[in-house]
Amino acid sequence: MKKIFVTCLCMLLCMYAFVSCEDKGKDIGSEYDPSKPVKLTAFFPDSGRIAEKVILKGENFGINPADIKVYFNKKQAKVIGSTGSSMYVVVPRTPGDTCDVSVVVGKDSVVYAQTFLYKISVTVSTI
């Protein structure tokens, strides 16, 4: 009888924990609004090499990475994610020494005033 009581109590507690979990007030970001301009503020780090992870800050990026294009000079970077006000991207291979970073969302195309310094890296390995 005691085992049945403990089992029922555990099941009730698990059900309570499952039902009480909600995403109240969870803000995942803001969608792109074509009526507002895309604004760029800053990015960091300001230098790096191939596959460097860079965080871009601004406004009105949207939250769908498929709708956002980021370029280092004319080389397209991989957009990992976006919250609408910040983005996580990966630097492409050999875009040049000093790179202009531009963001294209919808019909908006904006370039950061700051430039990114691309550092060439050489790796030697044995096969």
Image (tube, rainbow, N blue to C red):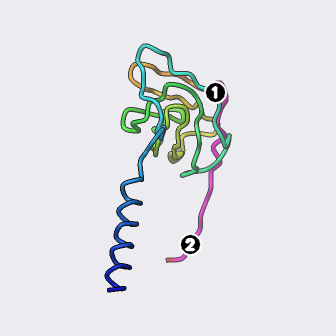
**Residue tagged 2:** 125
- State the SS at label 2: loop
Q: Residues within 10 Å of mark 2 (few under 14, many from 20)?
A: few
Quarter location, residue 107: top left
Residue drawn at 50 percent across, 29 percent down:
103
Q: In this picture, is 76 found above or below 8?
A: above
Residue position marked by numbered label 1 in the rendering: 41
Instruction: Give the x, y percent position of residue 23.
Output: 43, 45
Image location (x, y in percent) of residue 21: 42, 53
62 lies above or below 6: above
In the image, what residue occupies the spot 60% across and 33% down? 57
Left or right, 9 with reference to 25: left
**Residue located 58% across and 50% down the image:** 52
Quadrant of the rendering where the N terminus is positioned: bottom left
Q: Secondary structure at mark 1?
A: strand
The magenta stretch spans which residues? 113-126
Report the side of 11 relative to 45 (left or right): left
* Vertical order, 127 against 89 (above or below): below
Question: Counting residues from the N terminus, which is met first, the one under dot 1 or under dot 2?
Answer: 1
Amino acid at dot 1? Thr
Q: Amino acid at mark 2?
A: Ser
**Spatial separation of the CA atoms under disc 1 and disc 2:** 39 Å
| Relative image position of residue 28 (x, y in whole percent) | 46, 39
